[in-house]
Amino acid sequence: MRNRRKISLLGTLLLLAGCRQDMHDQPRFKPLAESDFYADLRSARPQVEGTVARGQLHEDTYFYTGKIGNNPGDFMPFPVTEEVLARGHQRFNIFCAPCHSRLGDGNGFVPSRGFPRKPPSYHSERLRKAPVGYFFDVISNGFGIMPDYASQIPARDRWCIIAYVRALQLSQNATMGDVPSGQKVPSEPPRFEEPGSGATLPVVEPKSATEEPQ
Ligand code: HEC
């Protein structure tokens, strides 16, 4: 009997404790309010040094910088598959072609409309020899007047784009020796000339009225 009373008293005490207002009334700072408690007079405290946000622990340094120590590396951090090239092709056409052109020769739309400098062609000797890590650095940190694309293009997509740039470089410098035996090379499609060069686009006229679409 005695024990039971003790237990119920304890229960009541616990309940009463739960009803206290301390949590609501406790002293606190409004976000970004001033405080004379800290030497810098800010109530918001800086993050502890070395804090890493969830999902942002970039342990694979090469994947995220393209560098080994201070030098650009020259290998892809993952195998180049057809899927990687297709992704790179698509991302390149979105993010790079407006300035560098779909061919990568630097004759993109944006420079032709007054962007202060024409990008260099990827097909120069220098950029054909540049290591893939160098391209990663240019995309991630920008180059000269070219802005960086670190926040728009995730690291993996940057690598996909670079794989595609390498394919573009190969495509513009291929020789007959690169054609697998037994395969024919289709004749070159008509090239679109730069505006103002006097060239006109090829016009294909139907041979006769019967060939017109119904
Ligand atoms: C807004 C236009 C613009 C876009 C978009 C752009 N670039 Fe550039 N890029 C430039 C210009 C301009 C330069 C030359 C910068 C200079 O010399 O100041 C350049 C230079 C470069 C270079 C050569 C660096 C060197 O050593 O000469 C590379 C490589 C490059 N860009 C890659 C890319 C890739 C890859 C993308 C897409 C992710 C891209 N760029 C998107 C304008 C652009």
Image (cartoon, rainbow, N blue to C red):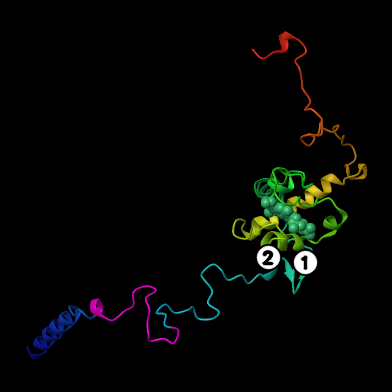
Quarter that holds the C terminus: top right
Magenta-highlighted residues: 23-40
Residue flagged by tag 2: what amino acid is it? Phe
Q: Pointer 2 and pointer 1: residues touching (CB < 8 Å)?
A: no
How many discs mark residues in the rendered view? 2
**109 or 113: nearer the eye?**
113
In this picture, is 209 found above or below 113? above
Instruction: Give coordinates of residue 150: x percent, y percent.
Output: 63, 60
Residue flagged by tag 1: what amino acid is it? Gly
Distance, label 2 to label 1, CA atoms, is: 10 Å
In this picture, is 57 found above or below 207? below
Quadrant of the image occupied by residue 151: bottom right
Residue 73, labelled with which disc? 1
- Residue at (74, 52) in percent of width and height: 117
Instruction: Give coordinates of residue 64: x percent, y percent.
Output: 66, 66
Q: What secondary structure is marked by label 2?
A: helix
Instruction: Give coordinates of residue 168: x percent, y percent.
Output: 79, 47
Query: What secondary structure is the magenta-colored segment mainly?
Result: loop
Magenta stretch: residue 1 in it? no
In the rendered image, the residue lying farthest to the bottom is 2
- Residue at (92, 41) in percent of width and height: 176
**170 or 82: nearer the eye?**
170
Precedes in sequence: disc 2 or disc 1: 2
Q: In this figure, which residue is indicated by the disc labeled 2?
A: 63
**Residue 162 visible in the snapshot:** no
